[in-house]
Amino acid sequence: MSDPKNQRPVPKANRFVETEAFWQGTKAGELMLQYCPDTNQFQHYPRPISIYTGKRNLQWRKVAGTGVVYACTIVRVPGPGMEGRLPLSVVTVEMDEGVRILGNILNREPDTVAIGQRVELAWDAIDDETVYPAFNVVEG
């Protein structure tokens, strides 16, 4: 990459919650979410215990990465290093697995993104080695 001062920050490991499976999944092009086997439900953001049972028997499972735009906004803050990246459409996606996750929409002009649109998983490069879940609109 060019000037290090203009790079986006890379996520750091969380010392309270084990998130290695999530980041290994991103490297493999797979979205991994925490799953509570006692209730057969996913949870996101990652936590040390199940939000449903309070137990520590969580699993990481690959999910399809499809869902619906639950909320959206447009980021229009100018800044060095962001040329060509703004304005940016940031959405909360209601995943088909029942959890909500934040991400960017990559394949549409921000003004055309709307609540209720179906989306599918895409990947947004933070730097040469790190990608983060993002989405593409697949209808509407």
Image (cartoon, helix red, strand yellow):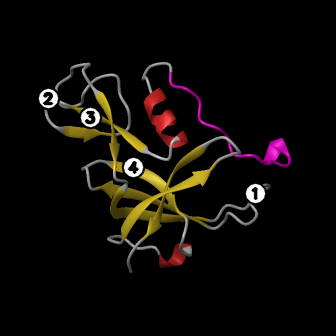
On the image, the x and y values in percent for residue 84 come to 73, 66
Is residue 80 toward the left or the right of residue 60 in the image? right
- In the image, what residue type sits under mark 3? Tyr
Which of pointers 2 and 1 lies earlier in the amino acid sequence?
2
Q: Are marks 1 and 3 in contact (CB under 8 Å)?
A: no
| Label 4 with label 1: CB-CB less than 8 Å | no
Q: Circle 4 sits on which residue?
A: 101
Residue occupying image coordinates x 39% and y 49%: 101
Q: Amino acid under label 2?
A: Asp
Q: Assess disc 1: are there few (<14), some (14-19) or many (≥20) residues with their C-alpha within 10 Å of its C-alpha.
A: few
Query: Of helix, strand and loop, which one carries label 1?
Result: loop
The label number, if any, that marks residue 79 in the structure image: 1
| Magenta-tinted stretch | 1-14
Circle 2 sits in a helix, a strand or a loop, which is it?
Answer: loop
Q: Which circle's residue, 1 or 3, is located before the other in the chain?
A: 3
| Image location of residue 85, percent across then percent down | 68, 63
- Residues under labels 1 and 3: Cα distance? 38 Å
| Cα distance between the residues tagged 2 and 3 | 9 Å
Q: Is residue 51 above or below residue 103?
A: above
Circle 2 is placed at which residue position? 38
Secondary structure type for disc 3: strand
Let me know if residue 120 is in the magenta part: no
Overall secondary structure of the magenta section: loop
Three-letter residue code for mark 1: Gly
* N-term-proximal mark, 2 vs 4: 2
Determine which of the numbered discs, if any, sits on residue 35 in the image. 3
Q: Does the CB distance between marks 3 and 4 fall below 8 Å?
A: no
